[in-house]
Image (cartoon, helix red, strand yellow):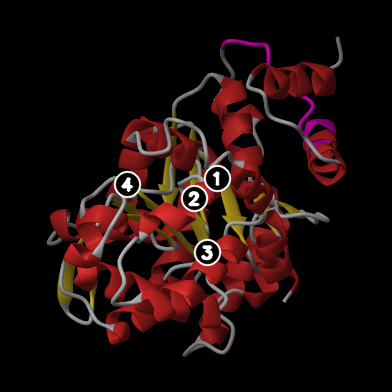
Amino acid sequence: MKDIEVALNNFSKKDIKIDTFQHAFLKEFINLDSKFKPSSFFLKNKSIGNIYLWGPVGRGKTLMLQMICDSYFVQYGRFHFIEFMQMIHKSLSDFSGINDPLLKVVKKLANKYNIIFIDEFQIEDIADAMIIGMLIESISKNGTRLFLSSNSPPEDLYKDGLQRSKFLKTIDFLNQNFMIYHLLGSEDYRLREIADFDSSAEDVNNNSSVKKFLKKTFSQDISMQKEFFINERKFNCMGVSEKVLWLSFKDFFSSPCSSNDFVKIVKKYEWIFINNFHSCNDDHIDLIRRFISFVDIAYQEKQKLKLFFDPKLIFDLYSGDLLNSLWMRTQSRLHQVGTKKYLQNLEKN
């Protein structure tokens, strides 16, 4: 069996469908790396090439690189860029006071990983810009391979940043030592997965089921920490990442929060997921008032919102009288935001 067939078979076993654009990337990668053997149990790190995979959000960049890492059966580390840089800065601090602390950090990483996969690679801070160039070059020269996913081509990294001229050497290194591939796509696979998820399933209020769904859809991006900060205040949540927020209807909207908080939330997070819905009446007037305000703001801001409950139960969500006129509008909007058409229209705008 050809390598490409073996690789595609590995995807199929995990119930992952590959589109035409993803297939083209995988084929080109395998052609360039003649020693890529998805069926082998071990590969020397030097047989694996560096990859810089870039393209629009939701095209499957993370999925592709994750599956390639898994196919090699070698020790690899996967990090979000922010997480990776936090780790680097901490390690540099730990090695402060000794000669060439960056080299110590690189050797530590090289001894631990055959591959380092950095997701959502981006350069926005001058301190990161100065460090990352030396880091990438040193890691590559020490035999560890780098897999980078990004929304931008190398030429646009740290665009208009302070002292960017010093960063151009890093861009040249990427172009000369990485497989640079632009992953296109006609559809946001992540949006498709979310839109197609059955919100009326019996287990949507089962936190472990929602957690499993989010982990699969966003790979390992979402952390299950139980709090986040907005307007210098701490709020409870079910899970959070840089772009994703998972809330409990019952817990979050029972706590004091304002429309100003909601505005900041929808501007900060690309996706918001809500589960743990329950029937309410006028005894829950504050909760419903907050939820109405949140839905209004999310709708106006064209927020990507997924509610884990059966749309048929919208009529049972609030049975009170005091907010009935306001609730009718919210009810209509809940019908809209829960549809595949609504989410697809957001992607086009």
Q: Which label lies toward us, 4 or 1? A: 4
**Neighbour class for label 1 at 10 Å: few (<14), some, many (≥20)?**
many
Would residue 281 be counted in the magenta stretch?
no
Q: Is residue 56 visible?
A: no
Badge 3 or badge 1: first in the primary sequence: 1
Q: Are marks 4 and 1 in contact (CB under 8 Å)?
A: no
Residue that extends furthest to the front in the rendered view of this protein: 321
Q: Are marks 2 and 1 in contact (CB under 8 Å)?
A: yes
Side (left or right) of 206 relative to 158: left
Badge 4 or badge 2: first in the primary sequence: 2
Report the disc number at residue 146.
1
The type of residue carrying mark 4 is: Asn
Instruction: Work out how far the residue at label 2 is from the one at label 3, CA to CA, in angstroms.
Output: 37 Å
| Circle 4 residue | 276
Instruction: Work out how far the residue at label 4 is from the one at label 2, CA to CA, in angstroms.
Output: 33 Å
Which residues are the magenta region?
Answer: 29-41
| Circle 2 residue | 118
| Circle 3 residue | 334
Q: Is residue 18 visible?
A: yes
- The location of residue 34, given as percent across then percent down, is 79, 26
Badge 2 or badge 3: first in the primary sequence: 2
For image coordinates 53% across by 83% down, the residue present is 300
Instruction: Work out how far the residue at label 2 is from the one at label 1, CA to CA, in angstroms.
Output: 8 Å
Q: Are marks 4 and 2 in contact (CB under 8 Å)?
A: no
Q: Are marks 3 and 4 in contact (CB under 8 Å)?
A: no
Q: Is residue 298 above or below residue 137?
A: below
**Neighbour class for label 2 at 10 Å: few (<14), some, many (≥20)?**
many
